Amino acid sequence: MQVKEDFEIKNLTTFKIGGKVKKLYLPESIEEFTGLLREIDNYMVLGSCSDVLFSSNGYSGNVILTTEMKNFEIKGTKIYADCGVKDPLISQKAGEASLSGFEFLIGLPGTIGGAVYMNAGAHGQCVADVLSSCCLFDKETKEVVFKQKDEMEFSYRHSVLHDGRYIMLSAEFDLKKLPREEIKELMDRNLTFRKTVQPSLKEPNAGSVFKNPDNDSAGRLLDKAGVKNFDMPNVKVWQKHANFIVNKGNATSEDVLELMVKMFQAVKDTYTIELKPEVIFIGDKTKKEEELCNILYQKTQK
């Protein structure tokens, strides 16, 4: 297992923002991963770092990155995958096996672990539709446990993993047989749609900034509130979709939080709706960041 000390995390994040982390661990198997989880304290488990904002101040704890855990297996209509398997890869492999249900993952920059954690979804599909069971690490008992789909507490962008007790190790999915050409057509359509409504990673971003409120779209609310014009020295709202923040090159985590608060406030002032961030903040906060996070993350939590 690779271990890196005082590691500059920013180049691993899709936002290209972040300071040094105390230690970075890259386990390659479930055995290495669970062994590590039993040994160390004060850690954060991440996959592709695609929906996170890392503090430019760094993180004085340990980061475990799952991206070297790449094992997966296809048996009939079932797919077994470690948490670090990349979403586009498993989507592609499922398509090649004439299995439908993972088409929505083709354009996502994350891992299966992150997809299950967030109950990722797009284009009428989501993780909860196809997941059968999960192999999890219980942080309280330090044991490996299994949960069936109905025990995963799936809802919009939520699973039992949000409660912090469990860490996903691997999962089993049950997909449906469909002609390969139909699956490819759907994947191509999803990719084309994504390119028109989301910035590519050539413009560093962390995906959707805010979650959709019930029966509405965060992007629509932000657009109507006029945030597409928000342009700061190092960050801006993407011109084609109001729910994306782009790092113009030298942005800090504080820059992003300031812009998020401006966006949050614009929607609150216009619609009296408090949007909830989808981007997760990680790291050691400055005093200013503490104040900004209190507005974004505490006031919006139920």
Image (cartoon, grey):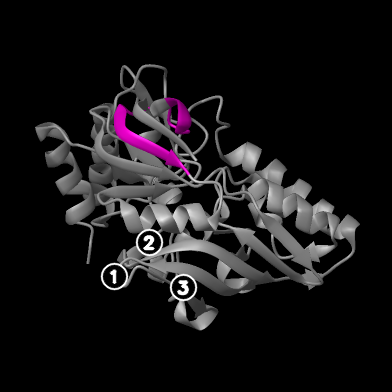
* First along the sequence among labels 3 and 2: 3
Q: Secondary structure at mark 2?
A: loop
Q: Is 21 a magenta residue?
A: yes
Q: CA distance from mark 3 to mark 2?
A: 16 Å
Amino acid type, callout 3: Phe
Q: Which residue is mark 3?
A: 154
Which residue is drawn at the image coordinates 57% and 55% (left, top)?
112
Q: Which residue is mark 2?
A: 213
**Closer mark to the observer between disc 2 and disc 1:** 1
Residue 28 pos. (x, y %):
55, 46
Mark 3 Cα shell of 10 Å, populated few (<14), some (14-19), many (≥20): some
Which residue is drawn at the image coordinates 33% and 35% (left, top)?
23
Amino acid type, callout 2: Pro
Labels 3 & 1 near each other (Cβ < 8 A) = no
Q: Is residue 213 left or right of residue 169?
A: left
* First along the sequence among labels 3 and 1: 1
Instruction: Write the start and end of the magenta stretch as one range.
Output: 11-26
Mark 2 Cα shell of 10 Å, populated few (<14), some (14-19), many (≥20): some
Quadrant of the rendered image containing residue 98: bottom right
Quadrant of the rendered image containing residue 208: top left
Q: Which residue is mark 1?
A: 140
Q: CA distance from mark 3 to mark 1?
A: 21 Å
Q: Secondary structure at mark 1?
A: loop
